[in-house]
């Protein structure tokens, strides 16, 4: 079974700083997908970024980028020029490649990120 | 944009009641999921469905059942609610293609008294 570990329950940085959230996972699969989701306070969970394991290039979405280290089974999220609106719970998630039953997510415990003015 | 709608934002029920949580998606997604979210535990999968009338157990199915009679609707049923089922429940849907992201509803905060 796959497991996902986020070792930082809470983090806090000043506005405009860069922050990195850690995520490690354990799997025997070779082909899979990794995701970061954001859940603002009392608001909907939304996708931040997605990485395909067979792609060596790290995914980026504007101020959000990942450092994907497949051999180390590490998938960290970097937020550059952090903004107050980045305050949220962040979840790392893993999905196997495959049909039907494979298409479920395994989530980490979450990191509560606070951006201070 | 994909819209996943959960019937209630907040719900209070009593121990022993049968509780229904409803979820509807408007994007013709094949997959639908029910999670519960608890502090420090992240999201844990209760049940999921990859087609109408199909269901598979997730990691914590005990005390729950589901129903998917129509493609757009996925219901979570607490057969006899207990206080340890007090939690946030999240519904999600996704296309039936490998690697597709899931889209989430706003969640239902359920309290069992």
Image (cartoon, coloured by chain):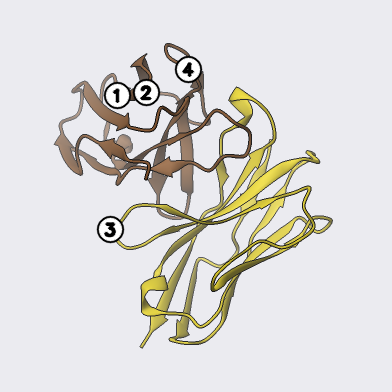
Image height of A95 relative to B58, above or below: below
SS at badge 3 = loop
Give the CA distance from mark 2 to mark 1.
Answer: 5 Å
Check the picture and name the quadrant holding the N terminus of chain A. Answer: top right
Circle 4 residues within 10 Å: few <14, some 14–19, many ≥20:
some
Query: CA separation, marks 4 and 1?
Result: 21 Å
Mark earlier in primary sequence (4, 1) = 4
Chain with colour brown in the figure:
B
Circle number at residue A42: 3
The CA span between labels 2 and 3 is: 25 Å
Q: A33 or B88: which is nearer to us? A: A33
The quadrant where residue A70 appears: bottom right
In the drawing, what numbered circle is on residue B51?
4
Chain to which mark 4 belongs: B
Q: Badge 3 sits on which subunit?
A: A
As measured in the structure, the alpha-carbon distance from the residue carrying label 4 to the one carrying label 2 is: 19 Å
In the rendered image of the structure, the colour used to display chain A is yellow
Q: Gap in Å between the C-alphas at discs 1 and 3?
A: 24 Å
Q: State whether discs 4 and 1 lie on one chain.
A: yes
């Amino acid at each position: 079974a796959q497991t996902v570990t986020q070792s930082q329950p809470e983090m806090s940085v000043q506005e405009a700083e860069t922050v990195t959230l850690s995520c490690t996972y354990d799997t025997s699969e070779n082909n899979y997908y990794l995701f970061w989701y954001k859940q603002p306070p009392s608001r909907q969970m939304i996708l931040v970024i997605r990485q395909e394991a067979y792609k060596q290039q790290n995914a980026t979405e504007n101020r959000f980028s990942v450092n994907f280290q497949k051999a180390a089974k590490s998938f960290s999220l970097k937020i550059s020029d952090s903004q107050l609106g980045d305050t949220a719970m962040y979840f790392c998630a893993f999905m196997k490649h495959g049909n039907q039953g494979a298409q479920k997510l395994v989530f980490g415990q979450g990191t509560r990120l606070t951006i201070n003015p | 944009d994909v819209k996943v709608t959960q019937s209630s934002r907040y719900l209070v029920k009593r121990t022993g009641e049968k509780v229904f949580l409803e979820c509807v998606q408007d994007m013709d997604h094949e997959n639908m999921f029910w999670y519960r979210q608890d502090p420090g535990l992240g999201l844990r999968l209760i049940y999921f469905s990859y087609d109408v009338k199909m269901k598979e157990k997730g990691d914590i199915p005990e005390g729950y059942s589901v129903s998917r009679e129509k493609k757009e609707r996925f219901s979570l049923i607490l057969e006899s609610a207990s206080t340890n089922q007090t939690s946030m429940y999240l519904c999600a849907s996704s296309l039936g293609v490998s690697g597709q992201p899931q889209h989430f509803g706003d969640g239902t905060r359920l309290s069992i008294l």
